[in-house]
Image: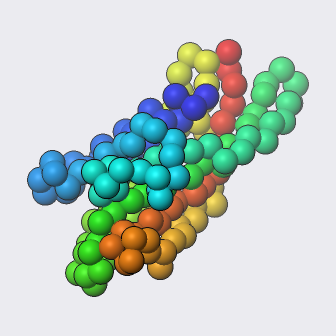
Amino acid sequence: MYNIIRTKINLLIAAVNATITGTDNDLKEVDTLLDADNLPANLRNNAYQIKLESVDCDEFESDIFEKVKVTIELFFLIAKARGNYTTVIDTYIRPLKRQLQQMTIYETTSYCINGIEDINITGLNKFKGGGNYMTPSISFNLNCSDIS
């Protein structure tokens, strides 16, 4: 389940990255599941982690339906500059929200992501490291079905 959801989200983030000038500015996945405070400095800029918060299961006839709460935690070095804050929202947050809203069905041989709902962006006013780092997150529910 996690790998399929992660693959789909990474495809959406790749679409956002395709609109950004310069590969140094691309969003990069941090593949360790650490709290943002514990990440080394080189992993705190233009980075993200995908975490599953919860899974609610329902069975209907022979099908298993799941509502999966997903959070994408983002990390940006803004160095206390308003221009960098604006860039984060306009270059990364808004386009990623748009990609999520336009997400279509994603199906593998064993799992299907049928839709998305309840997109929520938080932490736009959340700064760490003396105001040098911005750590927003985007959470949402995926409607999935186990088709194995």
Q: Is residue 18 above or below residue 92?
A: above
Query: Would residue 39 appear left or right of 22 to someone viewing this image?
Result: right
- Residue at 43 percent across and 71 percent down: it is 128
Residue sitting at the far bottom: 82
Quadrant, the N terminus:
top right
Task: In the rendered view, tell whether residue 80 sits above or below residue 5.
Answer: below
Q: Quadrant of residue 31?
A: top left
Viewer-closest of 87 and 117:
87
The percent position of residue 37, horizontal first and vertical second, equals 47, 58
Residue 140 rendering spot, x and y as whole percentages: 60, 55
Q: Report the residue at 31% width, 77% height from top.
A: 85
When the figure is inspected, residue 135 is found, relative to residue 99, above or below; the finding is: below
The outermost residue toward the left is 22
Colour mode of the rendering: rainbow
Assign the C terminus to one quadrant of the image. Answer: top right
Q: Answer with left or right where residue 107 lies relative to residue 29.
A: right
The answer to whether 68 is drawn above or below residue 60 in the figure is: below
Residue 65 rendering spot, x and y as whole percentages: 76, 34
Residue 138: give x, y in percent of width and height. Answer: 52, 60
**Residue at the (20%, 55%) spot, across then down:** 25
The foreground one among 36 and 146 is 36
Q: Is residue 40 visible?
A: yes
Comparing 98 with 122, the one in front is 122
